[in-house]
Amino acid sequence: MYQAASSQNILGGSIHGNVQIDGQFYVTDSAIGAPEVPEQFLSNGFANFIYERENFSAGLRYENYTNPILGFDPRYKGNGIPFRYLNYKNKEIEITAGNFYDQFGSGLVFRTYEERGLGYDNAMDGLRLKYIPVKGVYFKGIIGYQRDFWTKGEGIVRGVDLEWNINESISKLDSLKTKFILGGNFVSKYQEDQNPVYILPENVGSGSGRLSVIHGNLMLTGEYAYKANDPSDQNGYIYKDGSATLITATYADKGFGISLGAKRIDNMSFRSDRDANLNSLLINYLPALTKNHVSILPAHYPYATQPNGEYGMQGELFFHVRPNTLLGGKYGTDVAVNYSRAQAIDKVPTGDDMGYTSEFFDLGEEVYFEDFNVEFHHKWSKKLRQILSYIYINYNQDVIEGTAGHGHVYSHTVMLETTYKINSKNSIRNELQHLYTEQDKQSWALVLLEYTISPRWFFAAFDQYNYGNNFEAQRLHYITGTLGYTLGTNRFQVGYGRQRAGIFCVGGVCRTVPASNGFSFSVTSSF
Amino acid sequence: MKKILFLVAAVIGISFYACDKIEGPTRESIAIDTTCEFVEDNSIPTKKVLVEDYTGHNCGNCPSGGILLNDTLKPIYGDDMVVISVHAGDYANVCPGMLTCPPGAPLGSFAVDYKTIAGEDWNSTFSILFYPAGMIDRTGYPGNNVKPKSSWNQEIQDRLNLPAKARIRIQNTYDETERKVRACVETKFMEAMNGDYKLSVVLTEDSIIDWQLWYGHQPDEIVSDYLHHHVLRGAMNTSFGVSVGSGAIAAGTKIVTGYSADINTGWNEDHMAVVAFLYDAATFEVIQVEEMKIK
């Protein structure tokens, strides 16, 4: 069924790409609410093929959702080639016809990308021109429709972006230690007004200006975006304009790093179809500005950006405690402290279709999310390493999951990760996690064991136990076992176990994950 | 430099031309039919009560509210109780595409959008945060307008015991070919009143069979053939109606207005009704309500 491939030379050029197949056999498990799956087996897969010859490239991606794995949008059901393109580029100009992903600045106004884990794909289908008229000046122009599962959104998206790297373009400034990059863009969507009640703007414009200043190890970036009136399903058909501000500062030196970020989002959902919802047809990207926890228990409560309005801030500090000190031990200790918070903006209802007014610096009362976490990475010996973490999360379940009546979940998680390198090929890793909360499904404990035989094999098993659930019948074990094998650029993985229901987020964009039980496999290969 | 100036000019030029700013009214104007006529009738009305049930097909707790209204209370109060089921808020979003779609819901289920612009406007104005939420004649606004299910029966009785301060008559004409309904509404103030009064005229559809999440239902909580009653389909004269009187209004004052609306092909005209209600624009309290099938 599966055959590993390698790069091929064809017509003087080369073909390369990658393939992935994920599949799951489902078992009905009423204890965890895993639904019956009539197909019993569901699968997501894709294959990228890219041909390159000198300045020319062409590519396509075949996708196969027969039928989509639970938790992925059922509108993906089917198979075909939703992504294909032709591209030509030289030193001055690049032209793309067909599908492409791109981003203006930090994406507050325009970002198309694919995140397979989320089932997120808002690729453009149209034309893109990139042009470098003089050294240090970068122009992009795009026009087209966006992917909407197996169709395209009805709105046309067109935009231009201009970036000026001042030091690059002015030779006298090239040697300056301080670098300046200035940018601006404008994106407009067109969608016909067929609404019998509202008089809707058919052309909705949005633009932003940005500045980056880099001085040695210090980097400051800021972007302000504005969006004109854009009544939509997401904002309840209000005519208020929107805005987004994002400011970040980072400084890193040997053994020390700090990053600070702040944002304000006000009515900034921007989609090429005003009636679309959730992850469909988003033109822009609003970052979450919270830590994306990858460990299992803290990932129970991720944050989803609130495009209708939020304040967000995040601070992160890294430092290395020198060896031969009380905390540093023989090899030193790395410490990371992170705090983030998202909160409502203050909104004063206007009582008409403008919706509300909001002063820039006025905070709303409702806290959406708060996360304080600290990590200690310590190497005890050449063979033994440990990471000790504490994570506090205040999770506004109603706001983040779009439900009502749940309120806030306050969780405290402690984790200890231990890696022991037995010899140059064999290592064993253990995670102990405990999440305490009085809300939602109450407390959980987790034990994970992973054994790796480099470079080919790994075996892992973990048990999430919802031991603190107020309902005795729900005090369940979610046990999962995984086996992986890597051969060159090919990786095979099989697993069996229970998946708890929840939400899964990447960068503030989320999807629901239903409970499931069964056998899964994954095959990836590149060539 | 010329190249850069050209690009900057292009960016600015596109910015100005590819954006529509709606400065004036945000809603299409409502055509009021002034040709409606009613035969003289001096009958004395009784007070009727408007009960709004804010719900959503993905709200697993909502069927309990609908069942109480339609299976228990409606048989008791009959035509004196007019029900509107308002599908609004996140629980009324369609699937797929919503974060709260029931896990395991088959493709194609929960796909019909019962949300309406009027319903969303009401949902927002009346700060509906929990579902099902009931309002009885929209009393108690602001702050106490959402009534707990346990009090609905008593609240309804209390309202029905009030004297009727107004009478509403409805005459519907339905054009089968054009699928268009014309609703003429006569509002008569039975006693002298002082204030600002508005008349809302909306369309509802009864007995829609479609999906509903229903917690505790056996054998499945995802129900494919749930009977949805009195579903709001839209407003005929904007979300909050039109003014029919302000200031001092003499007893016996009559205002006749008429409105038209298209009946979508997906709606069953045999189950559709026009609901008209008169309310105090300052408090939203409903003075009188009437319901009439369109055919």
Image: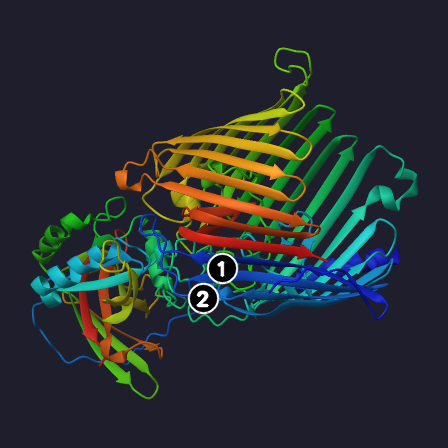
Image coords of residue A113 (percent x, y): 63, 55
Chain under label 2?
A
Foreground residue among B103 and A175: B103
- The residue identified by callout 2 is A198
Nearer the observer, disc 1 or disc 2? 1
Labelled pair 1, 2 in contact (Cβ < 8 Å): yes
The amino acid marked with disc number 1 is Pro
Label 1 is found on which chain of the structure? A
Q: Residues within 10 Å of mark 2 (few under 14, many from 20)?
A: some
Q: Nearer the viewer, residue A39 or A83?
A: A39
- Classify residue B44 as left or right of residue A79: left
Q: Is residue A246 left or right of residue B123?
A: right
Question: In the displayed structure, would residue B1 be above or below residue A210?
Answer: below
Image quadrant in which the N terminus of chain A is located: bottom right
The colour scheme applied to this rendered structure is: rainbow
Residue B263, position in %: x, y?
Answer: 33, 78
Q: Residue at x 80, y 53 (%)?
A: A138
Image coordinates of residue A19 in percent, x first then y, are 65, 59
The residue wearing badge 1 is A231
